[in-house]
Image (cartoon, helix red, strand yellow):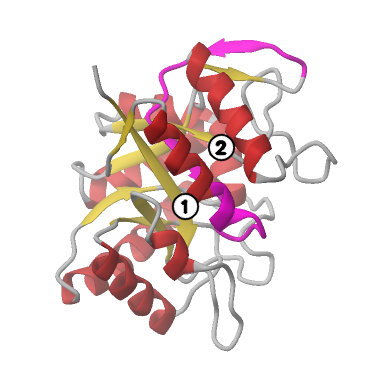
Amino acid sequence: MTRTLNLNADLGESFGAWTMGSDAELLAIIDSANIACGFHAGDPLVMRRTLQLAKAAGTGIGAHVAFPDLQGFGRRPMTIPPAELEAIILYQLAALDGMARVEGLALRHVKPHGALSNMACADAALARTVASAIKAYNPALILLAPALSELYKAGEAAGLPVVAEIFADRAYLDDGNLVPRSRPEAMIHGAAASLAHVSAMLDEQALISVNGKRLPTPIGSICVHGDGPDAVATARHLHDELIRRGYQPAPL
């Protein structure tokens, strides 16, 4: 039986004259693109150009919503009242969705970025705010959420379609959250190591922590962070090897 699996990456994270990542190369490999909406990265022209590249590649698109933190790349924790945060998320969804419509594209999913995602994965109230904003905008949008997280649970409770993702290039703590980037073991480096990391989790259908703890979970998508130096090589290696092992690439 053919097993489907989605490969996603965070794109559109350049800003003005500053270039981040290899978007065109990644779009030729991945199934779904999480496009920055201008709050942690990206700007109107970058957003539109990324959408145009995704359309040419036939890649599904989603909104990569974040805290308003351009200087910190959306990776700094922030405390924002629920009503304001919901408005911030709605603003980003509307901006990317509007540009997508101009290009003849349909927004398929939403994936929170950086500190917003990390905090919502652990904080049930924050996760409910994120899910509420998405549902208010379009309840048919897929929430792409880390496996076993409070964000995943909040999406399900809100009635959103939810897909559980794992990270090819990030390590896990025993509670299923990501190892903080401040720690040396946070990142998985290189295509071979990322494939081994992903393969072990797919084989066991579980998150596997740095201490070897197994946390059973369904897995629907794999993320490769587009800002890493190994991103293209890692995505290509994963794509080719997963197909060789019987998985069928599929958009969200």
Residue 2 location (% of width, % of height): 25, 23
The mark nearer the N terminus, 2 or 1, is 1
Determine the residue positioned at 70% across, 40% down: 188
Q: Give the Cα separation between the discs numbered 2 and 1.
A: 10 Å
Front-most of residues 248 and 225: 248
* For residue 199, above or below residue 223: above
Q: Which amino acid does label 2 sit on?
A: Phe
Q: What residue type is labelled 1?
A: Ala
127 displayed left or right of 103? right
Residue 166 location (% of width, % of height): 51, 32
Residue 115 appears in view: yes
Where does label 1 land, which residue?
9
Dividing the picture into quadrants, the one containing residue 164 is top left
Dividing the picture into quadrants, the one containing residue 1 is top left
Q: Quick check: is 231 in the magenta stretch?
A: yes
* For residue 78, above or below residue 103: above
Front-most of residues 110 and 130: 110
Determine the residue positioned at 41% across, 18% down: 218
Near mark 2 (Cα within 10 A), the count class, few <14, some 14-19 or many ≥20, is: many
From this viewpoint, which residue is outermost toward the front?
A: 244
From this viewpoint, which residue is outermost toward the left?
A: 104
Residue 206 location (% of width, % of height): 53, 16
* For residue 144, above or below residue 137: above
Tag 2 and tag 1, C-beta contact below 8 Å: no
Q: Tag 1's secondary structure?
A: strand
Near mark 1 (Cα within 10 A), the count class, few <14, some 14-19 or many ≥20, is: many
Quick one: quadrant of the C terminus?
Answer: top left
- Part of the protein shown in magenta: 211-234
Determine the residue positioned at 43% across, 33% down: 242
Checking the image for residue 167, the label placed there is 2
Residue 28 location (% of width, % of height): 37, 60
Q: Tag 2's secondary structure?
A: strand
